[in-house]
Image: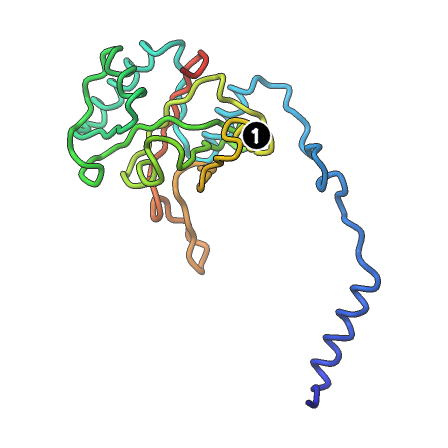
Amino acid sequence: MKISRAKENILKKIRQALSNPVPVPFPQSEGTDSIFAHSQQDPEVEFAENFTKLQGRFSFCVDEKELVQQLQTLVTVRKWKKVFCCETDLKKRLLTNGFNKFSSEYLKFCEAAVTSCELLVARTGSIVMSSAQESGRTVSVYTPVHICIAYTSQLVYDIKDGLALLKEKYQNNFPSLVTFATGPSRTADIEKTLVVGVHGPKEVFCFLVETDAP
């Protein structure tokens, strides 16, 4: 089979490249050490700053009673009639502290959904969720508004730290899906026009409670 001159030139360049490999520009990134230096800020502050830069809406709560007060205020101000939550423990804790706005409607009819999370990543302002959670794969992305309830003990600095904790937690039963949600859903067309809320929620709220996760 005759090889064209252009294809021959390409193959020649590939052979030359393989015989003289280019060194890895950041050799430390191939190991276990992070290339990012830890911030001097508290992780709560670091997460809040990075999360809000990405259009996330952040609120800090000293305990679950204050959490419920802030949730009640948010629902009242937004005039939401249908708020969804399917996580048994989370729903029970919120109901115990006086939150009475949950709807019995199916997810697709609700205006906002409340979920827990696996972790929060301070450096990127990301919410880490997995298919192992009771809310599953769809709750956090189906309604126009996602409300995440997290605890300060769930904060990690970097993605690498989060993955290490998830591996330790689940061992051989690692979830089939791990999501790093960084702000509301966004996409851009060929003209680079940014559109928010196309493939997921238009708004993401994170309520961070100052205590260990239950």
**The N terminus: image quadrant:** bottom right
The colour scheme of the drawn protein is rainbow
Q: Mark 1: which amino acid?
A: Arg
Please identify the quarter of the rendering in which residue 168 is found.
Answer: top right
| Drawn side of residue 104 relative to residue 122, left or right | left
> From this viewpoint, which residue is outermost toward the front?
172
Count of numbered marks: 1
Residue in view at x 18 percent, y 36 percent: 106
Q: Judge by depth and name the residue closer to the eye, 119 or 136.
A: 136
| Rendering coords of residue 95 (x, y %) | 23, 15
Q: Is residue 200 above or below residue 113?
A: below
Viewed as shown, does residue 41 lie left or right of 128? Answer: right
Residue at (70, 90) in percent of width and height: 2
Furthest-right residue in view? 20
* Residue highlighted by disc 1: 123
x 44%, y 18%: residue: 151
* Pick the front one: 61 or 18: 18
Residue 80 position in % (x across, y down): 19, 29
Mark 1 surroundings within 10 Å by alpha-carbon count, few (fewer than 14), some (14 through 19), many (20 or more):
many
Helix or strand or loop: what does disc 1 sit on? loop
Residue 141's spot in the image, x, y percent? 33, 40
Across and down, in percent, residue 70 comes to: 30, 16
Q: Quadrant of the C terminus?
A: top left
